[in-house]
Amino acid sequence: MSLITFPARKVGKINEGVKIKEEFPGIYIRARDKGGTGSAIDGGKKNSVWSKFVMVVAKSQAIIGLRSMHTESVVADATENQSWRQGISPGDRESVLETENQSSSTMLLSKSNIKIFNVKKFGAVPNGKTDCSKAFLSAWARACTWKGGAMVRIPRGTYYVGQPTSFVGPCKGRIQFEIKGVLKAPAGISGFDDTWIKFRYVNGLIVYGGGTLDGQGHSAWNYNDCHMNPKCRTLPANLRLDFVTNAIIQGIHSLHSKSLHINLFACRNVDIKSITISAPADSPNTDGIHIGDSSFINILHSNIGTGDDCISLSPGSENIYVYDVTCGPGHGISVGSLGQRKNEESVVGLIVKNCTFIGTDNGVRIKTWAPSEPGLVRNLTFEHIFMDNVQNPVVIDQQYCPFQSCSHKSPSRVRIQNVRYRNIWGTSLSKMAVNFKCSKSVPCKYVELKNIRLLYYGKDGKASANCSNLDGFAAIEMIPPCL
């Protein structure tokens, strides 16, 4: 979790509908007044409207509905320049990267203060043959009900986990899951649905330790025909998080998943950092990190190489921050596909920064179906990105149809707004280095390209760009220029 310093100063009472006069750029605050009334404040930019009466802060006394570094309760008596753990909008996240290591250490409880549950004491045998699923679940059950800090410890060695294994909360306190060994999945797919290892309904989870989740995907990839069959069988992801909040996944290796490597659904405030994801370039549907219906997810300092998207955002993804990630092989970082189903949630707030793409099929891509249901994508920023021999570095594809069954007679109805591409450079393997195929019915609005330099060394000329159906467009120092 990131830390942000919020100087304690008196702002006062703000009534409904009143515009604020001071700027609090990029801060997302949940505050309470002295009477206990809670309200959410989104943004806090100058002249924005705050919707409810709140007492934000007073210099010597404040009641703020945030978690501090050491407690989940509402905190009173704020002191000047105290740091608070809180959700922050993507626009301000890069300013707190220097403190994110400090944040992680505060969540990692001192081992002298926690109860350790070693899976070997519950019957786990690290020989790579004995099924350790029940032993893992028994250790989890004890740790989850421990009142106070608890740890499930998986020592070095190879542990065969032969069944779908779900670690379910809520738990009595924060819980650490230390993986130092190798967890090995069965070679086949019998008895599995969509997940191998799963955490559900857990608040304050830390998964770390430098261990490996080996999904044994080679044996299953020939069953995966989802690229051409919309009714394909769902194969198990290596790791899934459902309804998990305030979590850290750190220093874990995900290897050869049968399908998605890490899948997040309905999660909030999760840091995924210093992880490695590996699968061959020809392994189907092995997305590195897939996010849906989740908010305030940080993906930091990681290496992802797969046969599909390195990172993919599905409907309901909000305030996602990707920093210092190397992608390749794979299909790049994708928003979508979107618009396939009715009543899809929007994708709002994404920053991809200081990332490298090496030999990927795509770099940064937004994809929506045509025809499609209505939808919305807005407030995306891609900046300080290096492309090394990427096939399609910058893409907006609003004619997406993977099964070649679309008529394309009706355009996409997904609106794309406020997208910024800044400081993107490198080499393209295709002549079309920038390709925007926006919808004719709802053109892309307010797209900015600044300091773009993508080179193509093919014999058929210099790099080119296609920028179709854009409404509100600015290009500054762009190579290749939009036609």
Image: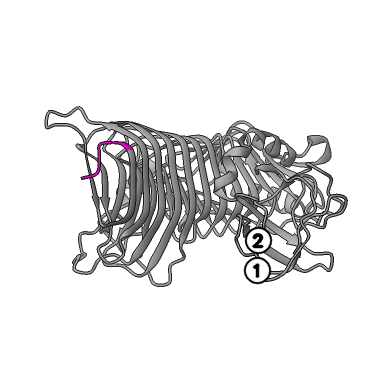
SS of the residue under disc 2: strand
Mark 2 lies on residue: 41
| Label of residue 258 in the image | none
In percent of width and height, residue 425 lies at 35, 32
Query: What amino acid type is highlighted by mark number 1?
Result: Ser
What is the span of residues highlighted in magenta in the rendered image? 477-483
Please, is residue 453 above or below residue 237 in the view?
A: above
Where residue 286 appears, as percent x and y from the top left, is: 39, 46
Is 66 positioned to the left or the right of 234 in the image? right
State which quarter of the image contains the C terminus.
top left
Colouring scheme applied when the structure was drawn: one colour
The image position of residue 257, as x and y in percent, is 43, 44
- The residue carrying mark 1 is 51
The answer for how far apart the CA atoms under marks 2 and 1 are is 8 Å
Q: Residue at x 79, y 36 (%)?
A: 110
Mark before the other along the chain sequence, 2 or 1: 2
Crowd rating for badge 1 (residues with CA inside 10 Å; few <14, some 14–19, many 20+): some
